Amino acid sequence: MELLYQLTDKNKELLSLARGEEIYYCFPLDLDREGSFRDNSYTVVTNLRILLLEEGSCTKAYRLSELEKVVGEPQISSGILYVVKDGKEEFLGRYSAKHLTRYSYITRGCLLLQRGEKERVISREYETACLICKRALPGTRECPKCAGKKEGLVSDFLMLIKPQWKLFVVIVLLMLSATAVTLANPAIQQRLMDDVLIGNKGNVKQAVLCLSLMFIMSLGIVFINAGKSYLCSKLGSRISAGLREKLYVKIQLLSLSFITERSPGELMNRILYDTGRVRDFMGETFCNLFTIIILFIADVLLMLILDWKLALLAFLFAPAAMVFSLSLRKYIRTRFHMQGEKADKVSSGLQDVISGMAVVKSYGQEEREAEYFDKNTEEFAKVQRSNEVFFATVYPFIGFVLEAGVYLVIYFGGISVLNGRMTPGRLFQFITYTTLLYTYIGWLTNMPRMLMNMVTSMERIGDVLKQEPQIFDHENAKYHEIQGNVEFHHASFGYKSYEPVIEQIDFKVKQGEMIGIVGASGTGKSTLINLVMHLYEVDDGEIRVDGENIMDIRLSDYHSQIGVVLQETFLFSGTILNNIRFARPEASYEEIIRAAKMANAHDFICGLPDGYQTYVGEKGHNLSGGERQRVAIARAILNDPKILILDEATASLDTENEYLIQKALKRLTNGRTTFAIAHRLSTLKDADRLIVIDRHRIAESGTHMELMKKKGIYYNLVTAQLMMQKN
Amino acid sequence: MPEEFNLSQMERETEEMLKIRYLTKHNTVFKRTEGGFVSLSVGEESYLRIQVMRMFPFMEKDRFLSVRSVGDKSKEIGIIEDLEDMEKETIKLLREQLNLRYFTPVITKIRSVKEEYGFAYWDVITDHGECRFTIQMGGNAVVHLTEERILLSDIDENRFEIPDVGRLTPAERRKLDLFL
């Protein structure tokens, strides 16, 4: 996202920048105090000052050093900017929701400058609209229309086709032959009429010859088209399968931050829907694209050669037909769009009521809901009916109008035939070509839309494929057998560059120690653990494992030596067996059973109908939360991790389950470096040391006894929990 | 030093949250701050800056306003049942704050709506001036608050209101047809 809008020279002059003063951030300030839209107004932040440029004059300026804070505060669909000076808040200006995200960076940006740091805050978020052409961006970094991507697109397209070039050549040959046969057929017809049928010039033999030729050609075109469609679908499927595979691999490679910034649905759409669109394009549009363009050109040329005057007459109607066809298509789309909307309303209403049936029934509101549903279905039926009527009655007329040019040709051509300037066969041939012309016009008007759909999908795919993973193996990354000593050294990190989640964390963990991490929600406990798992990289400082910088350890080696048990255990669709040996597919049955026994999972697994081969996960056998948890523990035990991570592993369990899992965890954590997060502090009583996180930093650390004596945050938390239990 | 956890205090606070405290012209003093915001003293409490929020932003623009403190732990100070019952000066001050908080331009004239590749580009005149915005087709960008009242959300989550579809000209209505 752009955080530095370019100012005009005139505006820059207004700032009267001092020597060495440099503009760091510049955002539009698109509303005045009353909330009216305006242009040419900006908030400018330099390394020394913050200034307001309002409609051609510099209205306010503060030295950053005299301010405590600069804040962009979100309001309802807009925001206000204020500064804090001498403990007082001073209003500066307003902006619309368009710039909300931009202004969320200003506090952090100014803070860095106030500290005298030269670093510029950058935003990884995407713009919602192209800054050049103002078109909405379909979730891509660059505008499919601008940014001179046209060449890139052609080369992207060629790259796609390259592995399939043999198939491609065959398709092109078929396209050419389809054109030739389509256009040759009317010529034979003309021969048949003029040379054989009319005026008894020919004989039966010639007639049969012509007819057989026509028959063979008609048959030929059927085969050619069938073959072409088959091969194009094949090409489309192969290309989209290739793309899907590439996307899948890439998404796996990309760091978690890329995934969490987007919804799972969006990524699934890119893999499934966008590649599907590319396939459809290759299979349907592309297949006909060249054939029709070649046909169209050849058709026009042939018509001109046959009778240029008549041809021009036929073309006269072409632009009108084109415009008519375009607006008609738009109109039909509007109608269908409406029908779709109404259908959506019906189905979403239905879904609402069915999933909320218990509430509807228990409040006795069945009748009202039924009425509401009735109204929606009726509306839907009305739109649908009117669409059906439109198609049944109006559509045939439209076809008539679209082909009006043909009647003109018949009229003037007929006169020519009567005057003997043209043979009937020639006229017949000409009429066929004219009909073809109008068919293609209809098709070609739809081209831009289909092409744009394809371009957009390609953009969205390319957007993922071109991402550079933020977490990758560094050059000197190497294998390292983990002992389990972990050290945070001045570590700071934030998911968004302007919002630090943990700051300046320093602590050392010895091999085999169990560390409990305590703190209120949202203070950065899970973030700390994500950093230990090396799912993210610290922005500042470093994390060392056995004295080695975590970045110098090969990722796959590192990850294979850590184990994780989370609150919401995720089991993959598959058997319990496969879930347990997820990290070590080569483990023997005995090892698996031993791990399951240690996790207190063996007994319940044996009780299941299909034992270890019971199918779980989506659509599979439903395990309870505690059971799932024990499978996850078995998974972790089997992996024999050197570093173990427990994130609320025993939350939301009943007492018996909790006991079993506590036991299992104790066996698991024995002798391993363990990081455990828990809200219920009693579960951390085995921890060697506790770390209390508050306001993004380590507030306290020590053993349970030490912290109780200290009477700080931890003491308060413990007493609070005890008191609540008593009540 | 962190605050001591005190169960009875917490219980008191939870109980307090149940109460509805009405703010009237008799028990409050609202003042404009130098920085352009509003301060409040009510009884023994005083707040350097307060925020005013509408509980029913579409139906009751002046009634049932929640006056809240600002900051991470923003909480309700009290409720103004009807703004009209306050002092003239206070009404003006609070209106200004409401105006700062709520930004939902009302569309008074639709100049054009163009649809292109899944997005609709609007060119309109609102009570806040001319504006062009873009909405995504097929999503939840258009919401019917009532039969005649429509709320549009653009791709940046700006919101625009059409208070009465019936009052649009037939030509404008046709442009809207795609979304109704």
Image (cartoon, grey):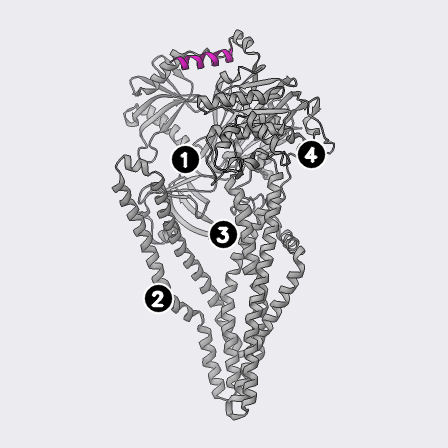
Residue placed most toward the observer, A191 or A417: A191
- At x 33%, y 59%, the residue is A386
Judged from the image, the secondary structure of the residue bearing numbered disc 4 is loop
Q: Which chain is mark 3 on? A: B
The answer for how far apart the CA atoms under marks 2 and 3 are is 29 Å
Dot 2 crowding, Cα within 10 Å, few <14, some 14–19, many 20+: few
Residue kind at label 1, given as amino acid type: Phe
Residue beneath disc 2: A393
Question: Does residue B74 show up?
Answer: yes
Q: Which chain is mark 1 on? A: B
The answer to whether mark 3 and mark 4 are in CB contact below 8 A is no
The answer to whether mark 1 and mark 3 are in CB contact below 8 A is no
The residues colored magenta run A712-726
Question: What x and y, as percent, mark residue A123?
Answer: 58, 34
Residue kind at label 4, given as amino acid type: Asp
Judged from the image, the secondary structure of the residue bearing numbered disc 1 is loop
- Pick out the residue farthest to the right: A476
